[in-house]
Image (cartoon, rainbow, N blue to C red):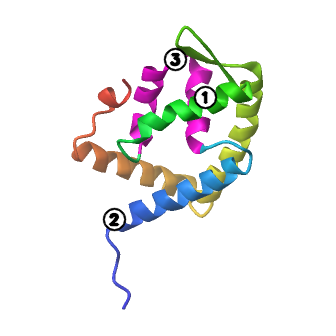
Amino acid sequence: MNAQRPLGYWLKLVDSLIDEQFAATLEEHGVTRRQWQVLNLLEQQPATEAQLNAGLSPFFASEDEPQSLNEHLAELVESGWVTVHDGEYSITDRGHISLLKLSELVEKIRTQFGQDLDGSEYDAVVQTLEKIARSLGWDPEQAQQ
């Protein structure tokens, strides 16, 4: 039997496989995916823990996850990749250099999961998913806050 699987099946499967690839690659270099995301946000500008929570909220898998952000931040501070002053976190030069190296690895993963699609196919998938998200109530204006 070769029945077509529903969209939700493919979304969950692909999301899970992407998460596994990112986690394995980043953890191989001593960083969690969440820490990598924190470094990316701090690369843009310093932020408080509340601002980081807000910026990362689309990626939280459970309601418990924001509490674990404190642990991720503590590890980044301990490693010298991030500093904290008066409740505001900033990326250090060491963190910036590490982020650049990690970003190269992440780009390889991104290239890998799109390698069997030509540019127009990849763009069509992304545009289709955005349309579906909008039809389900996603508002890009609120997502950027």
Front in this rendered view, residue 57 or 105:
57
Magenta range is 33-60
Main secondary structure found in the magenta portion: helix
Q: Which label sits on residue 7?
A: 2
Q: Which label sits on residue 74?
A: 1
Front in this rendered view, residue 116 or 28:
28
Q: Are marks 3 and 1 in contact (CB under 8 Å)?
A: no
Callout 1: SS: helix
Q: CA distance from mark 2 to mark 1?
A: 39 Å
Whether residue 45 is in magenta: the answer is: yes
Residue at the image point whose x is 36% and y is 52% from the top: 128
Callout 3: SS: strand
Front in this rendered view, residue 114 or 123:
114
Amino acid type at circle 1 is Ala
Residue at the image point whose x is 60% and y is 36% from the top: 35
Mark 3 or mark 1: whose residue is earlier in sequence: 3
Across and down, in percent, residue 6 comes to 31, 70
Badge nearest the viewer, 3 or 2: 3
Q: Are marks 2 and 1 in contact (CB under 8 Å)?
A: no
Mark 3 or mark 2: whose residue is earlier in sequence: 2
Q: Which label sits on residue 94?
A: none
Badge nearest the viewer, 3 or 1: 1
Task: Tell me the residue that label 3 is attached to.
Answer: 47
Mark 2 or mark 1: whose residue is earlier in sequence: 2
Is residue 80 shown above or below 128? above
Amino acid type at circle 2 is Leu
Across and down, in percent, residue 86 comes to 55, 8
Across and down, in percent, residue 21 comes to 61, 57
